[in-house]
Image (tube, rainbow, N blue to C red):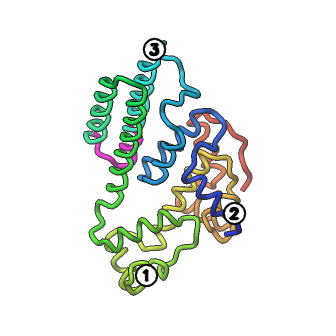
Amino acid sequence: MQPGQELVYQEFINRENEFIRAPYDPELAFYALIKAGDLEAVKKHCKENPFIVEAGWGVLSNNRLQNAKYHFVITTAILARYCIQGGLPVSVSYSVSDLYIQKADRAKSAAEITQLHFLLCMDYAKRMKNLRKKKIQSRHIAQCLDYIYEHLHTRITVEDLSDLTHLSPDYLSRLFKRETGQSVSEYIRAQKIMTAQNMLIYSDYSPGQIAQFLAFNSQSYFTEVFRQVTGQTPTAFRNENLRSTDIGRNSDQE
């Protein structure tokens, strides 16, 4: 990865407020972070973008507090659906949303709504992170998963994870396969492609830039792997998903 590319990748992961198209754009990207269970990125976003900052909000009530409550309910409903899509049980997701909507209904100030929004987002993100690790029994593999999620912008090897866990590469590989159902390389590839999908939908980075940010050897190799996993080229995936979300962008060339 060339100098500066790691920073660009981290800014995508940790700072969704850089997307300057429609206000819905960064909102969708933020929901994706919660769905992925990225606690640090969610915490950073909430700190830098307090909920009560009302840029882009529609006026659902002339009363400022009531308007904030209405938007909180909308946000909560969307988060519940996003996390259900990510594998959170329907009953759990809607129980969480009901709990926070009830708390918001009793709120007496906009500051309370802002704090509730932070707690809501962190609650869902923690649940999604725990869901990701639900089938993981050993702390060593849990360590590996955290490392992988935090270092997708680099080339990750079994040796890196072996050094992290102090297990032999062969033993770690067997343990990883047994607990995740995938080899180390398969799992890393799947997570990189999932991140690439989010970047294609929620950012303006070209397939070539994304290939570099995610430490693929070349754009052509990235395109080949992306097609193997999704059945589409990165450009075809972007065009199809932008149409489905009604967010228009110029298409990139492979």
Q: Examine the residues drawn in magenta and state their main secondary structure.
A: helix
Q: Do the residues labelled 3 and 1 touch (CB within 8 Å)?
A: no
Image coordinates for residue 246, horizontal then vertical, percent: 60, 33
Give the residue number, with chain letter if any, for mark 2. Answer: 4
Residue 63 circle label = 3
Q: Mark 1 points at which residue?
A: 162
Q: Which quadrant would the N terminus be assigned to in this image?
A: bottom right
**Left/right of residue 25 with respect to residue 133 in the rendered view:** right
Q: In the displayed structure, would residue 143 be above or below residue 58?
A: below
Which stretch is magenta?
81-90
Q: Which mark is nearer the camera, 2 or 1?
A: 2
Residue most extreme to the top: 62
Residue 75: say if magenta.
Answer: no
Which amino acid type corresponds to the residue marked 1 in the rendered image? Ser
Please name the residue shown 54% across and 65% down the image.
152
Q: Distance between the residues labelled 2 and 1?
A: 27 Å
Q: Earlier in the sequence, mark 2 or mark 1?
A: 2
Dividing the picture into quadrants, the one containing residue 226 is bottom right
Q: Can residue 116 be seen in this view?
A: yes
Mark 1 residue element: helix
Q: Determine the residue positioned at 54% across, 21% down.
A: 58
Q: Is 46 or 137 nearer to us in this picture? A: 46
In the rendering, at what x and y percent does residue 131 appear? Answer: 32, 55
Asked whether residue 223 is in view, the answer is no
**Disc 3 secondary structure class:** loop
In depth, the one of 205 and 43 nearer the eye is 43
Residue 195 located left or right of residue 137: right
Q: Which residue is depicted at the point 46% across and 14% down?
A: 61
